[in-house]
Image (cartoon, grey):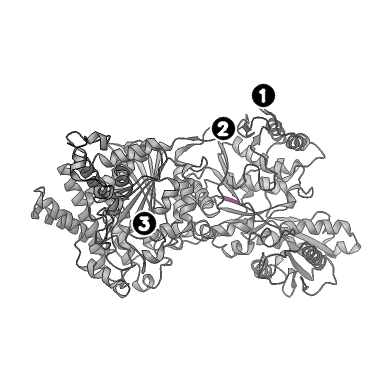
C-alpha cells in the first residue's frame, strides 16, 4: 500500500485549478482495498509502515494518512520510473518530508505576492492599452515567473555562472520583462511602432522590430547579467525563438554545453557542468507532439551532448490552440514522454504559488545534486484564446465559462495571506498601485517619443576575403605536423589494414606526390588547432566518417582503447572535440548551431551521414541558420558538410538538395560551396576558422564529396597548401590556352567537373581548343566579378553551357541561370546540360544512371549537342 501511495498518489492529487477532471482514482490508496481497517493499522508501529516516518507519527494509520497528504496534495509526484535507487530514495524522502512543513518566511510570502502582482498587472496593462495586438499572455500560469526566479537562485547559488533558457511565445514578454529585465518602455515601444494591421494577420516578421529584417516581439531573446554585491554572478540568456515550437530546445542545450567547456588546451575540452544551468519551457501540446522533444531529451546522458541536467517546465494550459488533450496526445499527462528518459516528474497546481515554489526548489536541488534532468508540469489554464484576438468560447465554451468566473492567482494568494494575517487589503492595493504607476510612467515616456524609422541596415554581398585572411601554411610546418599525426602512443596498435592506409600519408607532402581529401581535412584541422582555435565536430559517424576516410579516433584491435592523433599533436594549442552523434539530424544540428553561437571562437562542424538526410533538419536550416542573423543579429560560423553527388546509389543517397540552400541564400547570410579540389577544402576550412569571431563570420554549407574522396584528380600537390588561398572559381587546367579560339565555355560545380575532366582525357581531340571549363566552387555569394573577368579574356564565345548532374528543377540551374545572364555578353546563348525536371533526385537503377551521366557529359562537351537532351527513357 505504501508503494502504491507513492506510485499512484498522483491520480488523486489536487493539481487542476479549474477542477475540470472531477473524478479521482483513490482505490489503490485506501486501506480497505487491501482488507485493512483503521484499527488494523493502528496496531502497527509507524516505522513498520513507513521507514522515515516523522517523529510524532503515532502508528501505522497515522503514517498512511501523512503519506496520503504528501502524495495527493497540490503537488503530484512520479518517480517510480527512476531506476537508480539512490535518486529514487532521495526524491521520495524529499516529497515525504512535506514541503508545507517548510513554509516560506513572511517576507518570502510578501515578495511572492508582489511578484505575482507584477506579472498580472503587466498583462492587464498590455491588454487594455494595446487592444487586439498579439502578446500571447501568461495569464493562468502567472506563477511561471516566480518559479523561474527560484530555479535561477538555486542554480546560481550552486555555482552556475550561465543560465540558458528557451521558451515559446506564450508568456515570453512577461519573462523578458521580469526575469530578463527588459525595460517596460522597450516592450511598449515595440507595440507602439508596430501597426496593428501588420501584427494581427500573421506572426511573420514585420521588419520593424530588431535587426536587419527583424522579428516579432514575442520571438526575441535577451541577455541579462545579475549581480551578487559588486561582482557579476551570472549571465541569464533567453534564446531567440521562431514559432516552430520546441525547436529551440537543442539550440539552448548547445548554448549550455558551450558555456560548460574549457577549450584552452589540447585534447577533449574540460567539461564542468556546474558552470551553466539549462531551463527549457515547453507547451503541453508541443511536448508530446513535436518529435524534436524526444530527440533533444535523448541528449541527457550522451557524453558529447550532456549538460548536467536541464530543468524542464511544461507550461500547461490544457489546450493546443483549439485542440484539447484528448485529441493531442495518447497519454494521461503531457509529461509522460519524459518517463522513458528516467526524468523525475512533478505536477503542480499553478493556482498554489507556494506549492509551485516547493516544486521549483525540488527541481533545483535535484539538478544540483545529481546533475540530471528534472521536469515540472505546471498545470494552469489560458485566460484568453491562443492569441488575444481569438475567441476561445467558440471551441471550448464550458472551459471558458469557468475561466471567466475564476479569480486570478494573485487575487487568490492575496486572499490567503489576508486570512493568515500576513498582509491586509491596503498592502495588496499598494502593490497594485505601485506596479501600475511604473507601467504608466514607462508608457508615457514611449508615447512622447517620435516614431522611429524601421532599422533596415543593408547587407552588402561578401567580397573575397583572401586578401584579409592568410590560409596558406609553410610547407616545413605542414610536414612536421603530418609526421606528428602518424605517431601513436607507446604500445598502441592500429588496426593493420587502416595502419597501412595511414602510413601512405608519410610521403604525401613530398615533391611529385599529392594530398588527398581526407589528409587535406586532417591538416586543416591540425593547423587550425596550432593557430589556437578550438574545434568541435559531430555527426552520425563523424569519428570514422561515413565513407571511412577520416579515422580521427583510432581503435586498438586487442583492447578496444582509442586514440585521437589531434589530441596529442604537439603543435595544438586548443581543444579538439569529436563525437559520433545520435541518429538525429534536427536535434544535433540545432545543438551544434547553439554551441557555435555561444562559443564563436570555436570552429563547429556538423556532418550529415548523407546529404539526403539533412532535410530532416529543415526547420533548423530555415528558421535558425539561414535567417538567424537577419532576424536576430545572431552570428554563426557553423560548417555543414553534406555529402552530395550522383553516383548511382539511388534517390536516397544522391542529393543534399543544393537547390534549397541556394533558394535560402540572400543578404549575405551564408556561404554555399561545392568543391572539386582537396586544397580548396583546406583553405576554405582555415578561412572559416579565421573569420569565426569577426563581423565576416557566416555559416558554411558545403556539398561534400563521396566517391571523389579517393579520386586522385581531387588530390592536390603540397604547393597548393603552402601557397595561395581559397578561390571561388577555378579554371580547367590545359584548356583555354588560346582565348581567341574558344567558342564554348562550360560552367559547372562539384563532382561533375571531375567527370568532365576524365571524359576530356579519354577523348582528346582538336575541338578542345574551342572549349573552356570553369568550376564554380563558391555558389553563394555568387562570384560575379571573378566570372566576369574570366569571360572577358574570351572574346569569341558563342555559347555558354551550365552542366549539372541534378535534374533541371534541382541543383544550381535555377539559381545560376539568371545570374549568368547578367555576366555573359548580350545575345550569347546560355544552354543547360543535365537531367530533365524530375520529382525524384536520381534513378534507382545503376544502368540508367550511367547512361544519363554519359549523355550529360556528351551534351556539355560535344559541339553538335545543341538541344537539351531527354534522359531516363
Left or right, 180 with respect to 644, comes to left
Q: Quadrant of residue 549?
A: top right
Residue 641 colored in magenta in the image: yes
**Of marks 3 and 2, the one in the foreground:** 3
| Residue 705, image x, y percentages | 70, 52
Dominant secondary structure, magenta: loop
Dot 2 crowding, Cα within 10 Å, few <14, some 14–19, many 20+: many
| Residue 76, image x, y percentages | 29, 50
Magenta residues (range): 634-648
Which quadrant holds the C terminus?
bottom right
Task: Judge by depth and name the residue closer to the eye, 316 or 208.
Answer: 316
What residue lies at 61% left-to-right and 39% top-to-bottom? 528
Cα gap from disc 3 to disc 1, whole angstroms: 55 Å
Residue 654 colored in magenta in the image: no
Q: Look at mark 1 in the image and give the residue it sits on.
A: 490
Label 1, secondary structure: give it.
loop
Dot 1 crowding, Cα within 10 Å, few <14, some 14–19, many 20+: few
Residue 242 versus residue 574 in the image, above or below:
below
Left or right, 295 with respect to 869, comes to left
Q: Look at mark 3 in the image and give the residue it sits on.
A: 333
The answer to whether residue 211 shows anywhere in this view is no
Label 3, secondary structure: give it.
loop
Which residue lies most toward the top here?
490
Which residue lies most toward the right here?
766
Left or right, 444 with respect to 662, comes to left
Label 2, secondary structure: give it.
loop
The answer to whether residue 495 shows anywhere in this view is yes
> Of label 3 and label 2, which has the lower sequence position?
2
Left or right, 429 with respect to 815, comes to left
**Of marks 2 and 1, the one in the foreground:** 1
Q: Look at mark 2 in the image and give the residue it sits on.
A: 266
Amino acid at each position: 500500500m505504501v508503494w502504491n501511495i507513492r506510485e499512484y498518489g498522483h491520480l488523486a492529487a489536487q493539481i487542476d485549478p479549474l477542477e475540470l477532471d472531477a473524478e479521482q482514482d483513490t482505490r489503490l490508496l485506501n486501506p480497505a482495498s487491501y482488507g485493512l481497517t483503521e484499527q488494523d493499522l493502528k496496531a502497527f508501529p509507524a516505522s513498520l509502515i513507513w521507514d522515515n516516518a516523522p517523529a510524532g507519527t503515532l502508528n501505522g494509520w497515522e503514517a498512511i494518512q501523512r503519506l496520503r497528504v504528501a502524495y495527493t496534495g497540490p503537488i503530484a509526484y512520479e518517480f517510480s520510473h527512476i531506476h537508480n535507487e539512490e535518486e529514487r530514495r532521495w526524491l521520495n524522502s524529499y516529497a515525504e518530508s512535506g514541503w508545507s512543513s517548510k513554509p516560506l518566511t513572511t517576507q518570502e510570502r510578501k515578495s511572492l505576492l508582489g511578484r505575482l502582482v507584477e506579472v498580472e498587472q503587466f498583462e492587464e496593462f498590455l491588454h487594455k492599452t494595446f487592444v487586439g495586438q498579439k502578446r500571447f499572455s501568461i495569464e493562468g500560469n502567472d506563477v511561471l515567473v516566480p518559479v523561474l526566479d527560484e530555479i535561477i537562485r538555486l542554480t546560481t547559488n550552486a555555482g552556475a555562472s550561465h543560465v540558458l533558457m528557451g521558451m515559446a511565445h506564450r508568456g515570453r514578454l512577461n519573462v523578458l520583462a521580469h526575469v530578463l529585465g527588459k525595460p517596460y518602455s522597450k516592450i511598449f515601444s515595440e507595440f507602439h511602432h508596430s501597426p496593428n494591421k501588420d501584427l494581427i494577420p500573421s506572426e511573420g516578421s514585420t521588419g520593424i522590430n530588431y535587426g536587419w529584417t527583424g522579428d516579432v516581439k514575442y520571438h526575441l531573446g535577451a541577455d541579462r547579467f545579475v549581480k551578487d554585491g559588486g561582482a557579476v554572478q551570472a549571465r541569464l540568456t533567453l534564446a531567440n525563438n521562431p514559432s516552430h515550437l520546441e525547436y529551440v530546445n537543442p539550440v539552448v542545450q548547445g548554448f549550455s554545453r558551450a558555456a560548460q567547456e574549457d577549450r584552452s588546451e589540447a585534447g577533449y575540452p574540460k567539461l564542468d557542468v556546474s558552470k551553466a544551468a539549462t531551463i527549457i519551457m515547453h507547451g503541453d501540446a508541443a511536448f508530446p507532439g513535436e518529435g524534436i522533444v524526444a530527440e533533444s531529451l535523448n541528449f541527457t546522458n550522451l557524453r558529447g551532448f550532456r549538460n548536467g541536467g536541464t530543468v524542464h517546465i511544461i507550461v500547461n494550459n490544457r489546450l493546443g490552440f483549439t485542440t484539447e488533450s484528448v485529441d493531442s496526445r495518447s497519454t494521461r499527462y503531457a509529461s509522460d514522454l519524459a518517463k522513458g528518459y528516467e526524468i523525475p516528474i512533478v505536477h503542480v497546481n499553478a493556482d498554489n504559488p507556494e506549492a509551485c515554489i516547493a516544486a521549483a526548489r525540488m527541481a533545483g536541488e535535484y539538478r544540483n545534486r545529481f546533475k540530471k534532468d528534472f521536469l515540472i508540469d505546471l498545470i494552469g489554464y489560458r485566460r484568453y484564446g491562443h492569441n488575444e484576438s481569438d475567441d476561445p468560447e467558440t471551441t471550448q465554451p464550458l472551459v471558458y465559462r469557468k475561466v471567466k468566473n475564476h479569480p486570478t492567482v494573485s487575487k487568490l494568494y492575496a486572499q490567503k495571506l489576508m486570512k493568515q494575517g500576513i498582509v491586509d487589503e491596503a498592502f495588496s492595493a499598494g502593490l497594485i498601485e505601485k506596479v501600475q504607476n511604473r507601467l504608466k510612467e514607462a508608457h508615457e515616456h514611449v508615447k512622447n517619443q517620435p516614431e522611429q524609422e524601421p532599422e533596415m541596415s543593408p547587407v552588402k554581398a561578401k567580397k573575397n576575403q583572401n586578401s584579409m585572411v592568410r590560409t596558406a601554411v609553410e610547407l616545413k610546418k605542414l610536414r612536421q605536423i603530418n609526421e606528428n599525426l602518424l605517431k601513436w602512443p607507446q604500445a598502441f596498435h592500429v588496426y593493420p589494414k587502416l595502419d597501412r592506409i595511414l602510413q601512405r600519408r608519410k610521403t604525401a607532402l613530398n615533391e611529385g606526390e599529392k594530398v588527398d581529401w581526407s589528409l587535406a581535412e586532417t591538416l586543416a584541422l591540425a593547423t587550425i588547432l596550432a593557430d589556437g582555435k578550438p574545434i568541435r565536430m559531430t555527426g552520425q559517424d563523424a569519428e570514422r566518417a561515413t565513407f571511412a576516410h577520416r579515422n580521427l579516433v583510432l581503435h586498438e584491435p586487442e583492447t578496444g582503447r582509442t586514440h585521437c592523433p589531434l589530441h596529442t599533436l604537439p603543435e595544438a594549442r586548443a581543444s579538439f572535440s569529436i563525437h559520433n552523434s545520435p541518429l538525429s539530424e534536427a536535434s544535433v544540428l540545432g545543438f551544434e548551431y547553439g554551441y557555435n553561437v555561444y562559443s564563436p571562437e570555436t570552429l563547429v562542424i556538423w556532418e550529415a551521414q548523407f546529404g539526403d538526410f539533412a532535410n530532416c533538419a529543415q526547420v533548423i536550416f530555415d528558421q535558425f541558420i539561414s535567417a538567424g542573423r537577419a532576424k536576430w543579429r545572431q552570428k554563426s560560423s557553423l560548417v555543414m558538410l553534406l555529402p552530395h553527388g550522383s553516383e548511382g546509389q539511388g534517390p536516397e543517397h544522391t542529393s543534399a538538395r543544393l537547390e534549397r540552400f541556394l533558394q535560402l541564400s540572400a543578404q549575405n547570410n551564408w556561404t554555399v560551396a561545392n568543391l572539386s579540389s582537396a586544397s580548396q577544402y583546406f583553405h576554405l576550412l582555415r578561412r572559416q576558422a579565421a573569420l569565426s569571431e569577426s563581423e565576416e563570420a557566416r555559416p558554411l554549407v558545403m556539398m561534400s564529396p563521396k566517391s571523389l574522396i579517393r579520386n586522385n584528380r581531387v588530390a592536390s600537390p603540397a604547393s597548393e597548401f603552402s601557397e595561395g588561398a581559397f578561390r571561388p572559381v577555378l579554371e580547367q587546367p590545359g584548356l583555354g590556352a588560346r582565348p581567341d579560339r574558344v567558342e564554348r565555355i562550360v560552367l559547372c560545380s562539384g563532382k561533375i567537373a571531375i567527370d568532365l575532366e576524365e571524359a576530356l582525357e579519354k577523348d582528346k581531340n582538336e575541338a578542345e581548343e574551342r572549349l573552356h571549363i570553369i568550376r564554380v566552387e563558391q555558389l553563394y555569394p555568387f562570384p560575379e566579378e571573378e566570372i566576369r573577368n574570366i569571360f572577358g579574356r574570351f572574346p569569341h564565345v558563342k555559347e555558354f553551357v551550365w552542366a549539372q548532374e541534378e535534374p533541371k528543377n534541382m541543383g544550381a540551374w535555377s539559381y545560376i541561370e539568371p545570374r549568368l545572364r547578367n555576366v555573359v555578353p548580350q545575345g550569347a546563348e546560355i544552354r543547360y546540360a543535365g537531367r530533365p525536371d524530375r520529382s525524384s533526385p536520381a534513378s534507382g537503377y545503376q544502368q540508367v544512371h550511367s547512361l544519363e551521366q554519359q549523355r550529360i557529359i556528351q551534351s556539355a562537351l560535344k559541339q553538335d549537342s545543341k538541344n537539351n537532351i531527354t534522359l531516363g527513357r
